[in-house]
């Protein structure tokens, strides 16, 4: 059996969040992924982020497709409903779920195969639709679950474990999201919790589609020399352009930054993002420049990370575009949905 | 040339066929012609045979004036309005002996096309329009209205009824009413002066349409979804289902707007494809909204993977399949019942689904509501198997009624209190021994949380690869499907009490079957009729099959899909079943059923039938 429930042991001295819940309360089932798999580190960052955000687990809905990465949703927040759907189609499940209840927080976890080949269409259209959700792509350059075939994110010149060379141009999820109008686009590395945790928090609180492409090495099929998504290569070619701090609402801001270094961004729920530019030429509010910067660095074989782009304007999300009521659609009383027998009679006059 | 003898008087019992060019505005004139007859209290049937094209290809509209209220095609054409030069030759040939043909005599037609067993009447329609209207487009449009006026005079249709209809449809543009009435009058006057008015084919006021409406199935289904309380409608455009979601959206835009904020109490989402449409339907239903999609065969093919997930993970969904001619793209604007087997067993692995078979727009309305109740009660996808004929043609049917006492059956959805009172929640445990487990919705309680998955799971909702655990769930799903047999609508059986011959049909074949039975009965061949309304087949279906020795299965596809399903899912021996198949894409006629039954029953009865038809 590859599904193991973790024993719940209460430790009285574990730190608690504002709801009195410990980090343990945000964990899920025991992971069945390979030891050292990048995806498990992402799980741990997600767990940390939602614990720190003081979200009640049931306020969260976890959605995924199929792949090792898509199993992630089983491994955190067992108090939240999860939906492990079909390969590449998580975005549509998320859009439908969100249409039904705009008040929950939606977190989708996918892989590079799930998002960029079989599910490329749904990925693109969820961005265009601006579904209010956090979308994490655990990117390892291969199909882990089907044993190491190249995925669409494999770079040109990458060698597979068997020695085959990839010669097709890669799909970069951040460039794709930039060109599709994404309003929150980030990249990170499973091994950099410092960077990833605040990004997850910011992405969850962002109103609209927030995408984080997380380089998440596959130790079993893509961690060798010749791979551009191995731990070693990622660490060596890692370039953090912007660092994000997430400041919850009603927090006194204590950290001090030098003037001009920090870009404060107010979030709709009252929290604040403080973007620290590590590369002073970088402008995370400029789509065109971000695109150019990313492309140039990619050509140089560098993984640019951080909050690459945050739309400076207000981009209406799916519900705003549909102009739906504040009451979630799954809670509108039935009486308000139809005009009854009398209404029917008057509707039918046209047809008599 | 001597005029052939006119047909005998055929008051309120004849067929008009109008041959037009697509995109010339003929559809609205033709609908108005039908509606004016309906308003005179005379039952009518209307069928639109249109091409998969926006402009330029031939299109036909068939109106049957039927005092006996037969809603199927009869197979005759008594009056042809031949407005399309391209199809003229074919149209002339199609007129039944003794019938009439009207053509635009602005340009002469080759005499060689004349037939001496029909009456050919010319009227210079284009010339009339050129002399009386300005603008090319306007002249083209008005030509249709002029022939409407012409027909009013020839058939004795009340011009005042036409005026009333025009006033209703142009309520916001009174100038258009006058322009159209001018065209009607021009046609009317021309006919009165130059043509033998009235024809032996005539419309005479009756009182047989009171309490009826003329509505198409897609509109009725869209309205049904409103009354069912559906709030999420993801879809991808495809003929002939598009007008269903359009209707839902249009009703919602009037009925579902918050009076204070102007905000919408519905979400119609145009998806990127059918895969996404069904994914959104599942996401929304999983999250406690009533969501549905409308599509046609190609869409169902794409949705298959998700349909299997919905079956196995037990997520409610309502899918309307407005069937069209397959395989592949097939003939998108022609009708068939060709997705029966695909929908019954959609998706890989062992799956079976609930199907409802509406036979007309009235049932589309009620079955949409029923479909949601069944989908939520059974936590499974439910298909409403409409077709192009039902969906896109206006049908005369009894006025739709609503019972204000109705409340949606949301099935076993646990409340927060119920969840919290449980020692532990297990998603797939059959606690009530009816095959149906209880579900919980996201956002309600952390104790109700579970992991929805299409991968192997045990009755507690946990992942499994254990044979026994997997089979426990699969067996229970089978029990749930058996339970569905007791919840779906029973068939409608019309028994003579004396016949051991049965006839089984579904959906839009109803009209043709009803008329065929009457014809056969008059000639001493009584046949019992079972109209199946749902799959899985109920015990009444089984009993009917058992109690008849010879059973005709009438359906609109090549491969006898309904017959196959009956042999697979009931105990009926195959040798008892005789297929009557019609799959050319036009709605069935009563005549072909009568002839097929006669052929099968042998020479003696064939002679009886020949005398009848
Ligand atoms: C329709 C369909 N085709 C193929 C598969 C087989 N399959 C499962 S996971 C997978 C690739 C997963 O790759 P990725 O999304 O990158 O996830 P990873 O395992 O690398 O984390 C494939 C091809 C499937 N589940 N469904
Ligand atoms: S195969 Fe690769 S991606 Fe899958 S669990 Fe193992 S290391 Fe992770
Ligand atoms: Mg991968």
Image (spheres, rainbow, N blue to C red):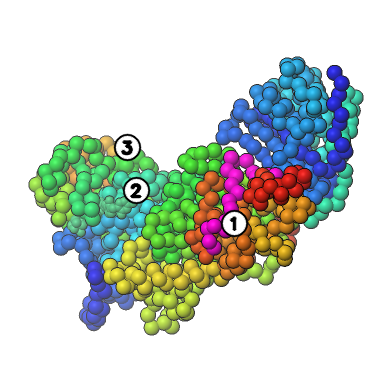
x and y, in percent, of residue A13 in the image = 22, 80
Which quadrant holds residue A190? Answer: bottom left
Judge by depth and name the residue closer to the eye, B195 or A171.
Answer: B195
Label for residue B544? none
Q: Which chain carries label 2?
A: A
Q: Is residue A98 shown above or below A168?
A: below
Identify which residue, B18 or A105, lies in the foreground: B18
Q: CA gap, disc 1 to disc 2?
A: 34 Å
Magenta residues span: B572-591
The picture places residue B408, in percent across and down from the top left corner, at 59, 68
Residue at horizontal 13 percent and vertical 51 percent from the top: A223
Image disc number at residue B357: 1
Task: Name the quadrant of the C terminus of chain B.
Answer: top right
Residue A306 seen in the current view? no
- The nearer-to-camera label among 3 and 2 is 2
How many other residues sit within 10 Å of disc 1, few (<14), some (14-19) or many (≥20)? Answer: many
Residue identified by numbered label 2: A119
Residue depth check, mark 1 versus mark 2: number of the one nearer the observer: 1
- Mark 3 C-beta to ligand 1 under 8 Å: no
**Are the residues at dot 1 and dot 3 in contact (C-beta closer than 8 Å)?**
no
Residue B122, visible in the rendered structure: yes
The chain ID associated with circle 3 is: A
State yes or no: Cβ of the residue under disc 2 lies below 8 Å from any atom of ligand 1.
no
> Which of the pair B208/A119 is nearer the observer?
B208
Q: How crowded is mark 2: few (under 14 residues within 10 Å), some or many (20 or more)?
A: many
Foreground residue, A241 or A9? A9
- In percent of width and height, residue B389 lies at 63, 45
Q: Is mark 1 on a helix, strand or loop?
A: loop
Could you tell whether B546 is left or right of A210 in the image?
right
């Amino acid at each position: 059996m590859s599904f193991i429930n973790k024993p719940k042991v209460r430790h009285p001295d574990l730190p608690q969040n504002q709801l009195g819940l410990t980090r343990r309360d945000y964990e899920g089932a025991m992971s069945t992924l390979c030891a050292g798999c990048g995806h498990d580190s992402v799980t741990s960052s997600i767990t940390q982020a939602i614990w720190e955000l003081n979200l009640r687990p049931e306020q969260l809905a976890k959605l995924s497709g199929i792949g090792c990465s898509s199993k992630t949703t089983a491994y955190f927040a067992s108090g939240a409903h999860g939906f492990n759907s079909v390969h590449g189609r998580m975005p549509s499940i998320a859009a439908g779920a969100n249409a039904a209840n705009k008040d929950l927080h939606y977190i989708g976890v996918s892989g590079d195969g799930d998002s960029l080949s079989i599910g490329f269409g749904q990925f693109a259209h969820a961005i265009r639709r601006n579904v209010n959700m956090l979308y994490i792509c655990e990117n390892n350059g291969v199909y882990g679950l089907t044993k190491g075939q190249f995925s669409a994110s494999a770079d040109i010149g990458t060698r597979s474990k068997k020695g085959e060379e990839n010669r097709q141009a890669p799909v970069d999820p951040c460039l794709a999201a930039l060109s599709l109008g994404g309003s929150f686009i980030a990249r990170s590395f499973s091994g950099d919790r410092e960077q990833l945790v605040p990004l997850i928090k910011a992405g969850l609180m962002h109103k609209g589609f927030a995408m984080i492409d997380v380089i998440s090495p596959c130790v079993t099929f893509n961690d060798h020399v010749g791979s551009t998504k191995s731990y070693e290569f990622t660490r060596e070619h890692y370039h953090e352009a912007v660092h994000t701090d997430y400041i919850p609402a009603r927090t006194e801001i204590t950290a001090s930054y030098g003037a001009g270094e920090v870009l404060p961004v107010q979030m709709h729920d009252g929290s604040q993002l403080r973007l620290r530019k590590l590369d002073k030429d970088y402008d995370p509010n400029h789509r065109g420049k971000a695109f150019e910067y990313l492309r140039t660095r990619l050509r140089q074989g560098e993984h640019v990370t951080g909050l690459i782009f945050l739309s400076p304007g207000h981009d209406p999300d799916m519900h705003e575009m549909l102009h739906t009521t504040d009451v979630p659609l799954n809670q509108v009383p039935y009486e308000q949905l139809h005009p009854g027998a009398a209404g029917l009679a008057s509707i039918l006059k046209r047809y008599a | 040339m001597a005029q052939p003898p006119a047909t005998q008087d055929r008051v309120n019992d004849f067929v008009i066929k109008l041959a037009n060019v697509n995109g010339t505005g003929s559809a609205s004139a033709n609908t108005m012609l039908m509606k004016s007859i309906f308003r005179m209290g005379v039952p009518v049937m209307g069928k639109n045979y249109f091409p998969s094209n926006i402009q330029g290809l031939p299109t036909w509209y068939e109106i049957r004036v039927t005092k006996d209220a037969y809603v199927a095609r009869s197979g005759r054409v008594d009056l042809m309005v031949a407005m399309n030069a391209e199809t003229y030759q074919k149209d002339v040939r199609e007129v039944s002996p003794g019938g009439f043909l009207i053509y635009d005599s602005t340009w002469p037609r080759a005499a060689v096309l004349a037939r001496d067993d029909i009456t050919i009447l010319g009227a210079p329609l284009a010339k009339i329009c050129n002399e009386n209207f300005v603008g090319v487009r306007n002249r083209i449009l008005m030509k249709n209205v002029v022939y409407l006026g012409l027909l009013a005079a020839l058939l004795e249709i009340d011009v005042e009824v036409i005026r009333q209809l025009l006033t209703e449809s142009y309520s916001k543009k009174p100038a258009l009413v006058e322009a159209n009435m001018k065209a009607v009058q021009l046609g009317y006057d021309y006919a009165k002066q130059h043509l033998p008015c009235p024809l032996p084919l005539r419309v005479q006021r009756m009182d047989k349409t009171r309490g009826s409406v003329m509505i198409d199935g897609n509109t009725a289904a869209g309205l049904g979804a409103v009354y069912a309380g559906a709030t999420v409608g993801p879809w991808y455009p495809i003929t002939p289902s598009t007008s269903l979601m359009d209707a839902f959206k249009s009703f919602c835009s009037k009925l579902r707007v918050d009076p204070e904020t102007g905000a919408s109490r519905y979400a119609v989402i145009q998806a990127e494809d059918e895969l996404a449409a069904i994914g959104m339907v599942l996401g929304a239903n999983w999250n406690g909204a009533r969501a549905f999609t409308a599509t046609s065969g190609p869409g169902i093919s794409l949705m298959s993977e998700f349909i299997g997930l919905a079956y196995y993970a037990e997520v409610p969904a309502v899918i309307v399949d407005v069937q069209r001619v397959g395989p592949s793209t097939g003939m998108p604007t022609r009708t068939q019942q060709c997705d029966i087997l695909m929908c019954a067993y959609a998706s890989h692995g062992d799956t079976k689904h609930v199907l409802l078979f509406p036979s007309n727009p009235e049932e589309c309305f009620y079955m949409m509501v029923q479909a949601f109740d069944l989908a939520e009660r059974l936590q499974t996808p439910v298909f409403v198997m409409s077709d192009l004929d039902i969906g896109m043609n206006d049908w005369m049917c009894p006025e739709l009624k609503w019972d204000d006492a109705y409340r949606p059956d949301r099935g076993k959805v646990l409340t927060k209190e119920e969840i919290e009172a449980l020692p532990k929640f297990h998603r797939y445990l059959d606690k009530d021994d009816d095959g149906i487990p209880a579900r919980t919705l996201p956002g309600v309680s952390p104790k109700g949380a579970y992991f929805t998955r299409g991968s192997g799971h045990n009755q507690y909702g946990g992942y499994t690869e254990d044979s026994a655990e997997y089979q426990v769930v699969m067996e229970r799903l089978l029990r749930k499907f058996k339970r569905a047999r007791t919840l779906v609508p029973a068939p409608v059986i019309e028994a003579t009490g004396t016949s051991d011959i049965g006839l089984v049909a579904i959906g839009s074949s109803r009209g043709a079957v009803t008329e065929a039975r009457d014809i056969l009965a008059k000639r001493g061949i009584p046949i019992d009729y079972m109209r199946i309304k749902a799959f899985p087949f109920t015990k009444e279906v089984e009993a009917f099959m058992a109690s008849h020795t010879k059973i005709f299965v009438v359906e609109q596809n090549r491969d006898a899909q309904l017959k196959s399903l009956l042999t697979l899912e009931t105990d009926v021996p195959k040798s008892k079943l005789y297929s009557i198949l019609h799959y050319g894409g036009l709605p069935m006629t009563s005549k072909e059923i009568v002839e097929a039954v006669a052929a099968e029953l042998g020479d003696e009865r064939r002679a009886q039938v020949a005398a009848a038809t």
